[in-house]
Amino acid sequence: MSAIIARFDWLGINICRLEKIAVMRLIRGLYSCPPNLFQQGSIATIGNFDGVHLGHQAIIKRLTDKAKALSVPSVVIVFEPHPQEFFRPEAAPARLFKLTDKLLALKDLGVDYVLCLRFNQELAELSAEDFIRRVLVETLHVKHLFIGDDFKFGYKRKGDFALLQQEAKFPVEANQTVTQSIDGESARISSSLVRQAIVDNDFEHAEKLLGRPYRFRGRVAHGDKQGRTIGVPTANIALKRVKSPLQGVYAVKVFGIKDKAINGVANVGIKPTLNARKERLEVHLLDFDGDVYGKQLTIEPVAKIRDEQKFSGKDELIEQINRDIEKARLILTD
């Protein structure tokens, strides 16, 4: 990523950046956007895009096709944190993707720019009309907007599809719904459906909704090294999200160390027996002995083995971990 090229303070954002991710650029904050960047216009969409599932991919395809047809850049507008995480973090949905995963997925789909707006009190109090004027008109010079017909925005969520059609000086088009047959009935593909599939330990269904296996990335950091004290060393990876859709012990595949996947056992939670507090992911790599600190790993959960639980002591914990390892071997060699 490139260095910071601009620093401003917009609606409480202290540092705004224009960063480069391969051929896609990330704009952190409205005033990080160079004044004439979108002078010729843009095609835009707004959303959370958690997981970048097949429904999202259909939206992005229409976005990029329209941008190419009009010879202007495509822009995806996202909010960080998610508005629900800002207003009610305890009730916010689990995140499928952290921001980096989302950006990489959007880059792979050919998006030119992502405008990431920090969601805070000032943005929450911005009127819908001012959002249209400041973001869509004055900064992005939008020529065509794709948006969900149930999208709400602006102070007290007073902005909606009808207001955009009324106030905007450009065409506003509703995103087309992408459906999948579930138990003989058609259901709209959504991030909620993906989360539920993961909670239900149905990773095959999650893959069908996403169009690819559910995977997430993280860098291995130094932890408390408690795993080594019980003979099961683990790679410690920060989840970097308010809530994870994964909870418990899983058989996983790990990418990023060798040319092929390495099998492993991962625990997502707070390790109650060892009195940990912060939720994190720790993965024990099967039949591997090497230094992975600092490496960027990609984790693919294959099957859930059990829920996280508190044991009477380390001996009982070690016995259970050994059973988990054996079960993971059976799952991953089938």
Image (spheres, helix red, strand yellow):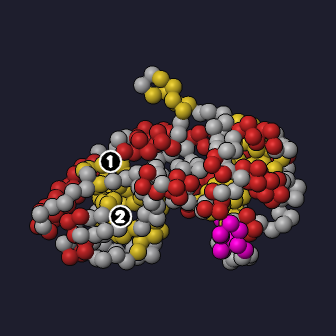
Three-letter residue code for mark 2:
Glu
Q: Quadrant of the N terminus?
A: bottom right
- The residue carrying mark 2 is 279
Q: Is residue 74 visible?
A: no
Residue at the outermost top position: 184
Q: Quadrant of residue 26?
A: bottom right
Three-letter residue code for mark 1:
Ala
Q: Which residue occupies 51% across, 44% down? A: 191
Predominant SS of the magenta segment: loop
Position of 319 with respect to 34 (left or right) is: left
Q: Quadrant of residue 33?
A: bottom right
**Does 147 appear above or below 18?**
above
Residue at the outermost right position: 40
Q: Which residue occupies 74% across, 69% down? A: 32
Is 21 contained in the magenta span? yes
Q: Position of residue 189 (x, y in %)?
A: 53, 36
Q: Nearer the viewer, mark 1 or mark 2?
A: 2
Tell me the magenta residue range: 8-22
- The residue carrying mark 1 is 303
Q: Is residue 282 visible?
A: yes
Q: Position of residue 135 (x, y in %)?
A: 76, 56
Q: Which residue occupies 43% across, 63% down? A: 239
Which sits in the foreground, 228 or 8?
8
Position of 247 with respect to 16 (left or right) is: left
Position of 73 with respect to 104 (left or right) is: right
* Numbered badge on residue 277: none
Is 246 contained in the magenta span? no
